[in-house]
Amino acid sequence: MLKMKKLKNSLSKYIPFFHAGLKSTLAYKSQIYGWMIIGVIEILFIFFLYQAIYRNAPEGMNSVINGLTFYEMILYGATSFIFGNAISSETGWNIYVEVRDGTVVNTLTKPVSYRIRHLFTCFGQAFFQVFFIALPLLVILYGIFIGCGFVQFEPLQFILNIVFFLIFLLLAILINDSIGYLIGMLTFYTQHMFGLNMFISSIKTFLSGTMVPLSYMGVFGVIFSYLPFAFLASTPILILMGKMELLMIFIYLTIAIGYLILLEFINHLLFKHCIKKIVVQGG
């Protein structure tokens, strides 16, 4: 009981960072509207692109290409866009700003864990993105596709898929934030973020299956499916769509947890090295 009380008191000091992350997301409502407009454009692009591909397939619009029908491909593309924005993290950029402005020195002197502080800020951002944008949009999206008969799911199996999807959604948020924190740590050395961020974003978009499903990449797609980036899009989405067997779900769940532990271990080592040689721009 005493240990639980101490844990509660220890975590309570990070609640303001959770609120700060939540407020920072709410402060820029224009970004939310812009995100939705871009989403509609991207979904239309996916629709017309794969419509042309499936029309030229041997069985036309009834073809199944790499395990996906035309409507499943559209559903995958729309889900990947919503999912990708739901798990987005500003941790890497926030660390870079602190390093650039020199405020990182003040932050490190506070009686809070630098990593947990950024994690709670990420949770605040993710809370709004997931519960107020992503999940409502996914409910509407899947409701339309199921209601119109474009896709079919066995009710009990679909409920189980949703449960596993939510578990992998949480893991995706944690893994993506860990990668963001790792990039942030590298800015202690590079003193720059733009090029590094663009490079990592491109890698994540390609290797996560956001750009195209990993099943379209043949043997390389199989290899990529075991990398940590696959848990940022491909794996959770395929689970939700019922395209993965239960055994593989547990295998990927174990792998995802392993990657999360490994990333956090690397981040811990990097942080210990970074704080020994902080170089602040301009001073």
Image (tube, grey):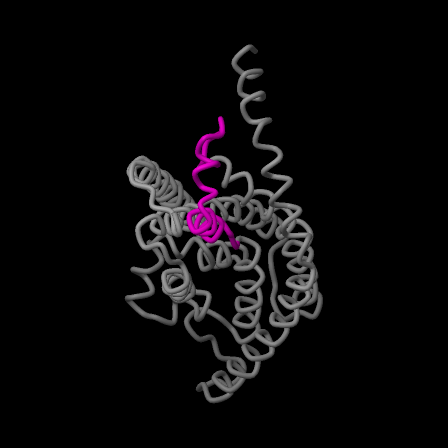
Residue 166 percent coordinates (x, y): 56, 46
Report whether residue 214 is seen: no
Quarter of the picture holding the N terminus: top right
In the figure, residue 34 lies in which quadrant? Answer: bottom right
Q: At x 38% / y 72%, what residue is drawn?
A: 216
Please determine whether, in this image, residue 67 is positioned above or below residue 164. Answer: below
**Per the image, is 113 magenta?**
yes
| Residue bounds of the magenta highlight | 88-114
Q: Nearer the viewer, residue 70 or 141?
A: 141
Give above or below for 14 relative to 234.
above
Q: Residue furthest front?
A: 283
Identify the residue shown where x is 43% and y is 71%: 212
User: Where is 170 relative to 276, above or below?
Assistant: below
Q: Is residue 254 left or right of residue 76?
A: left
* Residue at 42% across, 47% down: 99
The residue positioned farthest toward the top in the image shown: 2
Can residue 277 be found in the magenta stretch? no
Majority secondary structure of the magenta segment? helix
Residue furthest to the bottom in view is 56
Quadrant hosting residue 134: bottom right
Q: Nearer the viewer, residue 5 or 117?
A: 117
**Picture coordinates of residue 28 (x, y %)?**
66, 58
Count of numbered circles on the image? 0
Q: Is residue 106 visible?
A: yes
Q: Give 128 or 14, whichever is nearer the viewer.
A: 14
In the displayed structure image, the side of residue 92 where residue 141 appears, left or right: right
List x then y, in percent, for residue 25: 64, 52
Q: Is residue 261 above or below residue 166?
A: above
Q: Nearer the viewer, residue 1 or 144?
A: 1
Q: Where's residue 110, x and y in %?
A: 49, 30
